[in-house]
Image: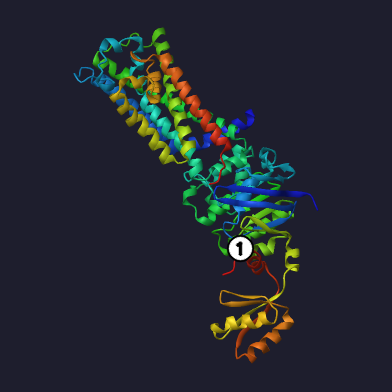
Amino acid sequence: MAELAISVSDLSKKYDSGLAVSHSNFQVPLGTICGFVGPNGAGKTTTIRMLLGLISPTGGSGEILGQSIKSPEKYLSQVGAMIEGPAFYPALSGAENLKVLATLGGFPLERVDQLLEQVGLAERGKSKYKTYSLGMKQRLGIAAALLPNPKLLILDEPTNGLDPEGIQEIRQLLRKLADDGTTVFVSSHLLSELEIISEYLVMLRKGEVVFAGAMQDLFDAQQPFMLVKTDNSNDLPKVISIAESAGHRAHIRDGVAHIEGPAEWAGVLNKLAFDAGILLTQLSPQLPNLEETFFEMTGDQK
Amino acid sequence: MIGSIKRVFFAEWRKLRRPTLLLGTLGAVAFFSVLVSSLLFLMIDSPNGNGDRGIRITREMLALPSGATQSFSSIGNLLGIIALCVFAAQTAQEYSLGTLRNLLVRQPGRIRLLVGKLASMKIFAVIMTLVSAVISIGVSYALAGGKNVDTALWFNSDGRLEIAKTLLNVFISILGFGIIGMVLGILLRSPISSISLGVLWLLIVENIVGAVKSSTLEWLPGNQLATIAVGGTETISYTHALSLSGLYVGIALVIATILFTRRDVAN
């Protein structure tokens, strides 16, 4: 494998309430965008905090940019991070907040204006942080993470509170950073966004890594499926039974039946349903996508 | 090492120098300095006394070389409580706002972070001390003539030595109160809780305990720090107050440092 930005081995964190992260193993190559996904409480933020030296692992080990996570001072000057949303001093302006962090990290103060410009906050840089909207706070958090001109950027839910335009801007920014050689490790619930920009993926479920690797490998291992709707929603369980009788895995989510199987089998299903007196109003073959795969692998099905 | 502490110092100073905090605090310092100094001279003939707890400070006492700093030294306790509030708020807010995680990502050396923050807050305490000294000595000098208090000895060599000694003592006292505030901030991680507990202890608990059993005043931490500010009292010597305060503050600092460096930052 290529040089690694992040490598963790058997990484664990145990609290009195139980294991928050359990024997995690994953690697993120340098220069890639890696999505970090999992349901709420899966251990994403705990993992990120361990990577940044904010909390101590109770087991296992990890390396960031080739340095042990036991010595965060050796790598954090090359790491930018936004953890669990932006956190700044309400009474200071956006620019002054960045200057506090720039001073602390020994970065040139001139970078503050550049970064405010880069994240679209140049005109509000002198306004107090407490007057910012959620989207503006988020942009300031991203600007703070970019202060060190990082080799590794770790972002926890960077698009929270952003409008669609803002989300697209952040996506483009992350793509550009990756193209310039920055490794981006980003957790998000916007799976469709992650699917667009990520090359690698780490998926957590109840503190355990259920997948870590190239996004394409994940999809290659998944079955194509079809989305099925009936004119009478009471018929959906019957469609599920028909599919399962034919050896296809199936479940209902959000009022739609998700049935595994190749596109060619759609005609057979349609006939079987028709013979059973069920009228299908939608039958759309789909290729595996991150959202479907996520629900499949994390078992987080509605 | 020194370079990173300097960076923490200046980063912290950016927060401390914001007008609402700096001017607000100095406004409170100025108010108490004017109030206490004015009362000392304007009530000089009052049968109820013109000093702390009804003590009478006569013209003859005020005419001594220590007269210029009489009001300044007695403000020490109030200045200490202000410092406790500022230090506690500045420390605890890092937890309550969640900004500690940003600071630790940029400066993972936790002891350096603590030392740099403390150094910056010390400068804040120095400014508080100087402002209070200038105002209280200035107000005392302005009022002395009208109340027939002789100021001839105030600024001779003995007087200047008294001013320097009082400045140092008040600063030590303020710093002690401030460090207690900082320790409370680290322990409780909430500005409101740490300020409430600190003020409650110093203004109410110690006074009640001292009133019920006066011998405890020799051991209560707030009283030791207040004693340092006035350079010792008839019942508690300066050396006793200084050494006992040093012990209390030292133990508190060690506990806070261990907690700060080892505790997970999970908020």
Quadrant for the C terminus of chain A in the image: bottom right
What color scheme is it?
rainbow
Q: Is residue A66 above or below residue A269?
A: above
Image location of residue A150, percent across then percent down: 68, 46
Residue that appears at 42% across and 15% down: B240
Instruction: Classify mark 1: residues with Cα within 10 Å, few (<14), some (14-19) or many (20+).
Output: some
Secondary structure category for the residue under label 1:
loop
Q: Is residue A61 above or below residue A208?
A: above
Q: Is residue B120 above or below residue A131?
A: above
Depth check, front residue: B190 or B123 = B190
Image location of residue A38, percent across then percent down: 62, 59
When asked about the image quadrant of residue A226, the answer is bottom right
Could you tell me the amino acid type at mark 1? Leu
Image location of residue B70, percent across then percent down: 33, 17
Direction from residue A102 to residue B74 in the image, left or right: left
Q: Is residue B126 visible?
A: no
Q: Is residue B49 above or below residue A140?
A: above
When asked about the image quadrant of residue B181, the answer is top left
- Total residue callouts: 1
Q: Is residue A268 visible?
A: yes
Quickly name the residue at label 1.
A190
Name the outermost residue toward the right: A1
Q: Subunit of mark 1?
A: A
Residue that appears at 35% across and 8% down: B153
Direction from residue B146 to residue A103 in the image, left or right: right
Depth check, front residue: A13 or B252 = A13
Name the outermost residue toward the left: B47
Residue that appears at 59% across and 58% down: A159
Image location of residue A59, percent across then percent down: 66, 45
